[in-house]
Amino acid sequence: MPMSAIACSERGINMNKHIPAEIERFDLSARIQHVIMFTTFLLLSFTGWGLKYAYADPSSAWITIWGGAKTAGIIHRTAGIIMLLDFLYHQFYLLNLWRKKDLRLTVVPMPKDVVDFFQNVAYYVGLSKKKANFGKFSYMQKFDYWAVYWGMFIIGTSGLFLAFPVMASYVFPTWSISWAWDVLFIMHSDEALLAIVFILFFHFYNEHLRSDVFPMNYMWLTGKMPIEELKHKHPAEYEYLYGDKGKK
Amino acid sequence: MKIWLNTLLLLVFTVVSAPAANAASDNASCLTCHGAMQGTVEKEKGVLVNLHIDQAKFEKSVHGGFVACVDCHLTFGPNPHQAPSANVAKAVKDMANAISAKSKVDAVAQAACLNCHPDMYKEYASSIHGRNVIKKRSGDGPVCTSCHGSAHYIQPKTNRESMVNHFSVVSTCGNCHEEKSISEKYGFSPLVMERYLESFHGRKVKLGHPGAPVCSNCHGAHDVKGQKDAASPVAGANKKKTCGTAACHPGATDKFIAAITHKPLHPIAHYSEIALILLTLGVFIFIVVHVFLDIYADVRDRLFRKGNKHE
């Protein structure tokens, strides 16, 4: 999922006479953060899935591929910690952008997203012939982005507690211990399923299977979007950047 | 003098080699028939005796090769046509009487484990299982073969085929501990097995983790105690020690050991689970509908609105 595309190296471009052929939406750091995020996500999903469905037939064979239950557990914990560090790093990345005054809050959900949503659905079903006037990030992309925060909050913290249960036991108040452990387990396992389903259906469709990006949206490698695409897919952002010049 | 020496030599030879020779010939003669016989006979009402002995399997078992049939089947002499003799040691006879409610096929053979495994038997007799069978003369509760399987085919614990192997002992305990009639009668949670199996411990064992604990790792095996018995390794303060071994969870706290109880799910956990499942389902329905609408609009635009692809 797009970790962040808040860096806006395009700030200066506004004053340029020419509209560039393409525009950078993900800087190198964001692209690396994304690669770490999805690599650890896949490792966590593959190893965790076997444990969640341990009693389904293929699971034992599947876990054997990952080096057996013990190794799979080590892979899972290591990947989990790397993912949490990646997430933590992202917060510093944002702070740094803010410090450099490069932080535009383009990924923060706004009332306009609700309008965009209804406009988009109306367009889907044919009630309107006008496409939604998406900004730098559509509500779907914002959903993608904040899903990671939800996942980190629910799955990350519960996972950390479950990986170090003795230490975690100091944190919980005595009155919660008759259910806290089961709640942690349920949170971790059910929300992980939600995350996998979300990525598998929503993110894979939008960034891999959709007819205009198939087989994949190469932006995760290049970080750049052709200006024509920006104009069509994110018209409000195009308007913001190039204003009158963009109108033909 | 020479005669005396010869006699001694003969005596030594007899003592050393005769039992083996005897055992072999004994087993061979028993197996002549029992290796070929199939099916069961009813000894008394409801008590079926399996007559077949799989010779190859017996010989590969831990007892194969050196235990003679009559070492355990003590009431049977070498001659099968003779009536069963009563020439059985008192300890075995007493034990056979004590466990007769449980062991109906051949209580003497069942009690004969005592002869070679006295320490195990002592531990077992002090356990909640042993006390129930021996002292209370109950028909519930295991005897040796209930957990280890027929003495004819016992495999070492390290063998996956063994009923008490790390990866099979849980289902062996489950034979009784999953039974509702047993959990009601003896007052333990009917969900013991279910809750264990869905715990991290149970799942890891299922996936082949050699270090994840099975029933006996925490509760003990031959010396297993009831949950209210202060000597039980999971009773009171003992539980912290049992969970907190160096290989498992060193430094285990009181709050930590509450994680595994085998008790039914707490209502808070139960409703959290329902809430999270509803959330997952809701998001899932939303994204699937959204994706299909997008596909529909995409196909429609490509087919019918070619000029209007992007606006």
Image (cartoon, rainbow, N blue to C red):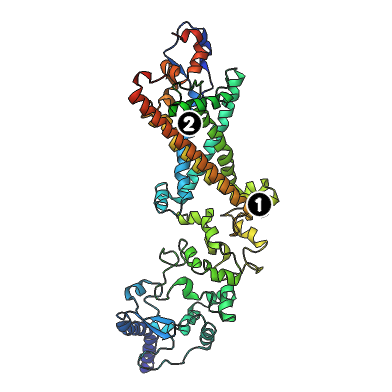
Three-letter residue code for mark 2: Met
- Identify the residue position indicated by label 2 in the image: A1
Which chain contains the residue that carries disc 1?
A: A
**Disc 2 or 1, which lies upstream in sequence?**
2
Q: Residue at x 46, y 31 (%)?
A: A35
* Secondary-structure class at tag 2: loop
Place of residue B166 in the rendered image (x, y in percent of width and height, measured from the top left): 47, 62
Between A118 and B197, the residue placed more toward the observer is: A118
Give the numbered dot on residue A221: none
Between A199 and B307, the residue placed more toward the observer is: B307
Q: Residue at x 67, y 47 (%)?
A: A172
Drawn side of residue A161 relative to residue B67, left or right: right
Is A19 rendered above or below residue B208? above
Which chain contains the residue that carries disc 2?
A: A
Place of residue A142 in the rendered image (x, y in percent of width and height, measured from the top left): 53, 28
Is residue A119 visible to the viewer in this orientation of the structure?
yes
Give the numbered dot on residue A177: 1
Drawn side of residue B242 relative to residue A18, left or right: right
Is B89 rendered above or below residue B309? below
Q: Quadrant of the N terminus of chain B?
A: bottom left
Three-letter residue code for mark 1: Ile
- Between the residue at mark 2 and the residue at mark 1, the CA separation in whole angstroms equals 35 Å
The total number of labels drawn is 2
Place of residue B177 in the rendered image (x, y in percent of width and height, measured from the top left): 53, 67
